[in-house]
Image (tube, rainbow, N blue to C red):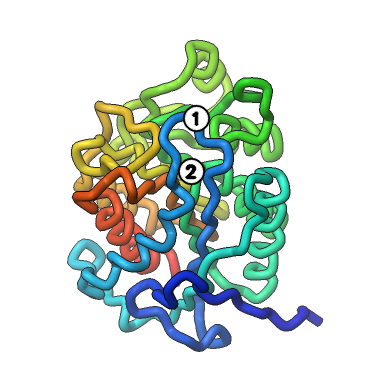
Amino acid sequence: MTQAFQPFNPAYSGNVFIGATDDFASAKAVIYGMPMDWTVSFRSGTRLGPARIREVSLGLEEYSPYLDKDLADLQYYDAGDIPLAFGNPKKSVEQIYEFVKTLYAADKFPLGLGGEHLVSWGSLRAAWEKYPDLRVVHIDAHTDLRDDYEGESYSHATVIKKVCDAIGPDRVYQFGIRSGTRQEFQWARAHTHFFPFEVAQPLERVLPELEGHPVYVTWDIDVMDPAFAPGTGTAEHGGITPQEAFRAIQLLSRLNVVGFDLVEVAPQIDPSELAQILAAKLVREALLAFVK
């Protein structure tokens, strides 16, 4: 028998994502925050991302004209932020893994808000344990394929290499990448399904390969051009537009997506709120696209 789930609650303000139910049992999906930026290598502050994404979501309409669906027709619960071990990336990732594993045991779709990208390793481990045939769609500006960064194996720069080492690089599909070392680009071209610079067009081409498999989507906000999302720790020019992002989610809706996270929003860098508002809208689209 599955142990009774005790949901977290947002201790910082009580805010939840727009339209969230207060009934965990009836929810098909659970939003959870991973407020961690212990290993960032440039501009910190992504631990503040989950809270601010929730807050700005209140300015959204619940209806998506892209998908012709409405949040009012979907039951989802906002569990707040996981209380992570401050300054301890390995323990924090383990806490995320244990939490998401509990969501899968309760038959809930997990939707995570970061936080630096290393947090995704905890969620992805839980997804792989639940779905051994898992495929991973990685949408990002950066390769994240290092074995270590400045001697540290638990780093935001190593998260996708950890995934490749665990499930095999042939199950990893990378889109939008435009930054990394020469060695990372060479390794990706040789081992993963690697589609730099673009997202929607190459994604549409490989959809037949992904159909029939469980798919986890990990989305770094810095895949967007900084003109549209300046609030991120390691912004990279030459990114995609919001229109391409929404098209990518429409395409992914054709697949059996079993988990999603959106990471690397650093709200204190972006007083315009562009990154936070875009992130909230992407979360709305993901809920409506992926939760069946």
Give amino acid for label 2.
Val
User: Quick check: marks 1 and 2 in contact, CB under 8 Å?
Assistant: no
Q: Position of residue 205 (x, y in %)?
A: 36, 37
N-term mark: 1 or 2: 1
- Which residue, given by chain and number where applicable, does mark 1 sit on? 41
The answer to whether residue 256 is visible is no
The answer to whether residue 189 is visible is yes
Residues 62 and 249: in front is 62
Residues 44 and 211: in front is 44
User: Which quadrant of the structure image shows residue 38?
Assistant: top right
Determine the secondary structure under disc 2: strand
Residue 238: numbered disc: none
Taking the image as shown, residue 158 lies to the left or right of residue 28, namely: right
Reply above or below: 67 against 177.
Answer: below
Q: Residue at x 40, y 79 (%)?
A: 20
Q: Residue at x 34, y 79 (%)?
A: 19
Give amino acid for label 1.
Ser
Disc 2: CA contacts within 10 A as few (<14), some (14-19) or many (>=20):
many
Q: Residue at x 32, y 54 (%)?
A: 279
User: Which quadrant of the structure image shows residue 196?
Assistant: top left
Taking the image as shown, residue 244 lies to the left or right of residue 1, namely: left
Q: Position of residue 133 (x, y in %)?
A: 66, 49
Disc 1: CA contacts within 10 A as few (<14), some (14-19) or many (>=20):
some
Q: Nearer the viewer, mark 1 or mark 2?
A: 1
Considering every residue shown, the one lying at the far right of the view is 1
Determine the secondary structure under disc 1: loop
- Which residue, given by chain and number where applicable, does mark 2 sit on? 137
